[in-house]
């Protein structure tokens, strides 16, 4: 019989499965995923995870993840980039969307190509989290549209005119005049170090 203490391991297996397949399996495959011998043991685990807020039932009776299912552990202290310090797992959880995404209907994640923003720490292969239809201010990194083409630059003002500044001296400042349209403001950056 599964123990409540094992629920963290069961949850981790479900999260790994979901990350791979973008769905939760039916009871029979769940037995193999969770390493349980019976359907009733799987049901008990799912009901405990439901009680803890990790999964819920859809109107047609299928199991589905909740927002808490996607929360990740949050360390109790930040990690300094200078002198070493002890980082402790606080046991609390953190949903990345809650930190990066204020309005899901206006938020889009865009892959970055090119190296014009390298000195701003934005590299090819990164993903920028962009909030569309948000008023841009000088100093904001924006996704702009000039003559139907998208570009990622820092919005600035020169001689009362909006300009787009690259973060790489190999690229010129863009002065689009009235052809400039701001698609959205960059509110976050995602980088995968294991490509």
Image (spheres, helix red, strand yellow):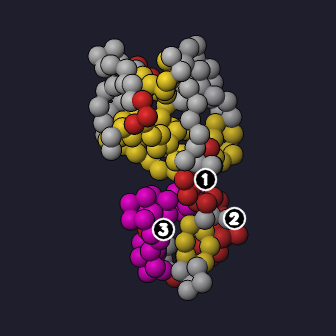
Q: Is residue 128 visible?
A: no
Q: Residue furthest bottom?
A: 60
Which residue is denoted by mark 3 in the rendering? Answer: 34
Per the image, the residue denoted by label 2 is: 52
Question: Is most of the magenta stretch helix, strand or loop?
Answer: helix
- Sort mark 2 into few (<14), some (14-19) or many (20+) by Cα contacts within 10 Å: few
Q: Position of residue 106 (x, y in %)?
A: 54, 53
Which of label 2 and label 3 is nearer to you? Answer: 2
- The x, y position of residue 66, in whole percent, is 60, 65
Q: Nearer the viewer, mark 2 or mark 1?
A: 1
Q: Earlier in the sequence, mark 2 or mark 1?
A: 2
Comes first in the chain, label 2 or label 3: 3
Residue 110 in the image: above or below residue 78 = below
> Could you tell me how far apart the alpha carbons at marks 2 and 1 are, in whole angstroms?
26 Å
Does the magenta segment cover residue 25?
A: yes
Determine the CA span between mark 2 and mark 3. Answer: 17 Å
Packing grade of label 3 (10 A; few <14, some 14-19, many >=20) is some
Q: x and y percent of residue 134 in the render? A: 58, 43
Residue span colored magenta: 7-32
Question: Mark 1 or mark 3: which comes first in sequence?
Answer: 3
| x then y, percent, for residue 59 | 60, 84
Q: Nearer the viewer, residue 56 or 128?
A: 128
Choose top left, top right, bottom left or bottom right for residue 100. top right
User: For residue 187, which numbered disc appears in the image?
Assistant: none
Q: Is residue 124 left or right of residue 163?
A: left
């Amino acid at each position: 019989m599964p123990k409540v203490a094992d629920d963290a391991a069961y949850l981790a297996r479900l999260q790994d499965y979901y990350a791979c397949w973008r769905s939760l399996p039916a009871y029979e495959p769940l037995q193999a995923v969770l390493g349980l011998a019976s359907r009733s043991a799987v049901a008990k685990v799912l009901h405990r995870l439901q009680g803890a807020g990790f999964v819920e039932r859809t109107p047609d009776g299928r199991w589905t993840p909740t927002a808490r299912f996607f929360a990740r552990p949050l360390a109790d202290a930040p990690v300094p980039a200078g002198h070493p310090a002890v980082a402790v797992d606080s046991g609390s959880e953190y949903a990345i969307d809650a930190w990066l995404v204020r309005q899901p209907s206006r938020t889009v994640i865009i892959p970055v190509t090119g190296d014009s923003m390298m000195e701003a720490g934005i590299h090819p292969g990164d993903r920028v989290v962009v909030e569309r239809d948000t008023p841009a201010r000088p100093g904001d990194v924006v996704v702009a549209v000039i003559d139907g083409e998208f570009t990622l630059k820092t919005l600035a003002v020169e001689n009362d005119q909006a300009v787009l500044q690259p973060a790489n001296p190999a690229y010129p400042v863009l002065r689009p005049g009235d052809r400039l349209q701001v698609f959205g403001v960059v509110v976050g950056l995602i980088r995968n170090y294991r490509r």
